[in-house]
Image (cartoon, grey):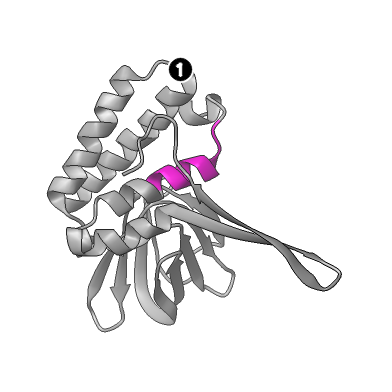
Amino acid sequence: MSAWRAAGLTYIDYSSIAARLLRRALKPEFRKAAEKRDEVSVRITYWKDGKANREYPMYLLYCYSTLPCA
Amino acid sequence: MKLIFAAGNQVFYDAVAVKQVDVPSFSGSFGILPKHVPTLAVLKPGVVSVFENEGAVKKIFVSSGTVTINDDSSVQIIAEEAVSVDQLDSSAARDVLSKAQSELSSASTDQAKAEAAIAVEVGEALVKAVE
C-alpha cells in the first residue's frame, strides 16, 4: 500500500493535488487560464412556492492545508 | 485502434485511430498496441505518448486519471488535467518540485507528510518531462 493510502488519503485527493501542481508548472501564458480551474464557485438559490427565495452566493476554494494556494 | 483522450480542460483525441499509446500507471508504464488485452489502470503523473497513424508522436502530460482498454481494442484515457508537454515551463516545474521537497521536510502530521510526498512525486514527474 502506498504511503498516502496508509495516511488515509484517497486517489481523489492524490488526483486533485497532481492536477493543481500540473497547472502551476505551465508556461505563464497558459497558467492564468488554467489556475482558474483551481477555484470552484457555487451559487445556491432556494426556491419556495415557485419563486426564487433567497440567493446565497458561495465561493469555495479548494486548498490543501499543507499546500498553499497560489 | 480508436483512442479517446480527454481531460477536464481539453479533449485531445475523440475516437481517432492511432498506432500506439504509452501510458504511465500505478501498475507500471506500459505501451498499448492494437489487440491489447482488456485492462483498467490508474494513471500516474507523467507523459502519455501517442503514436499517430501519420507518424507524428504527441507527448501529453497527465496529472492523474484512468486508462481503459476495451475488448474491441478501443482505448479511453480520462485525465483530471492534461497538457501538451511543450506547454510546461521548466523553471516552474523545478519550482514545484523544490517547494514540495521543503513541504515534505517540514511536514509534521502523517496527512501533511503524505500530501507533500504526493507533491514530490508529481514534481519529479514534471521535472523529468521538461528535461
x 40%, y 15%: residue: B108
Foreground residue, B22 or B111?
Answer: B111
Q: Is A17 in the magenta?
A: yes
Tell me the chain of label 1: B
Q: Is residue B38 toward the left or the right of residue B80 in the image?
A: right
Picture coordinates of residue A52, whole percent (x, y): 74, 69
Look at mark 1 in the image and give the residue it sits on: B109
Q: Is residue B130 visible?
A: yes
Numbered disc 1: secondary structure: loop
Above or below for B94 versus B11:
above
Residue at image point 42% right, 31% down: B115
Q: Is residue A18 above or below residue A34?
A: above
Query: In the image, is residue B51 above or below residue B121?
Result: below
Q: Position of residue A4 (x, y in %)?
A: 48, 30
Amino acid type assigned to the residue bearing label 1 in the image: Thr
Foreground: B75 or A38? A38
Q: Which residues are magenta?
A: A9-18
